[in-house]
Image (cartoon, rainbow, N blue to C red):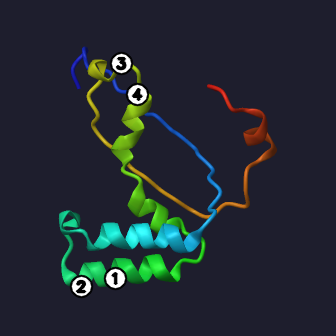
Amino acid sequence: MSDNEKFLRLTVELTVEVLDVDALQAAALAEIRHPDAELTEEERAEQAELVTSDESGASALQWLIEPDHVLQLVDHIDEIEPREAVLGVEPSDGPSDEDEEEHEHV
């Protein structure tokens, strides 16, 4: 790394309420079946099984969010160059007390 290179790691935690698991799964399955998904038939079947067997909706949601979408949260996007994006979705017990109090920037 040169003296001019600077990196920042952005961490975002978001809790969402799933209002309709079936609709969420259907949307994810449409993404999995889309030709642009670049999956083999075996991979499509495997991913579809993961989505439909996950009653929490986490596997489905993961298919519907692109890690690069987070970049839209940055006002001065021309000032940065994305280098790595990782996304994880897992079941939650709901918003923490802290989440309900904080709706603005932290």
Q: CA distance from mark 2 to mark 4?
A: 37 Å
| Cα gap from disc 1 to disc 4, whole angstroms | 35 Å
Q: Residues within 10 Å of mark 1 (few under 14, many from 20)?
A: few
Query: Label 2: which residue?
Result: 42
For mark 4, give the secondary structure.
loop
Residue 36: where, in percent of width, then height? 19, 63
- Residue 52 sits above or below residue 61 on the image: below
Query: Which residue position is annotated with label 1?
Result: 46
Instruction: Point out residue 92 in the picture as x, y percentages from the top left corner.
Output: 67, 60
Q: Identify the image quadrant of residue 56.
A: bottom right
Look at mark 3 in the image and give the residue it sits on.
76
**Quarter in which the C terminus is drawn:** top right
Question: Which of the 4 quarters of the picture holds residue 69?
Answer: top left
- Classify 6 as above or below 36: above
At numbered mark 1, what does the secondary structure look like: helix, strand or loop?
helix
Q: Which residue lies under the disc numbered 4?
A: 8
Question: Residue 9, position in %: x, y?
Answer: 43, 33
Left or right, 61 with respect to 96, comes to left
Where residue 53 appears, as percent x and y from the top left, is 51, 83
* Among the two numbered marks 3 and 1 on one chain, the one whose residue lies closer to the N terminus: 1
Whether the residues at callouts 3 and 1 have beta carbons within 8 Å, the answer is no
Distance from disc 3 to disc 4, alpha carbons, whole Å, reads 14 Å
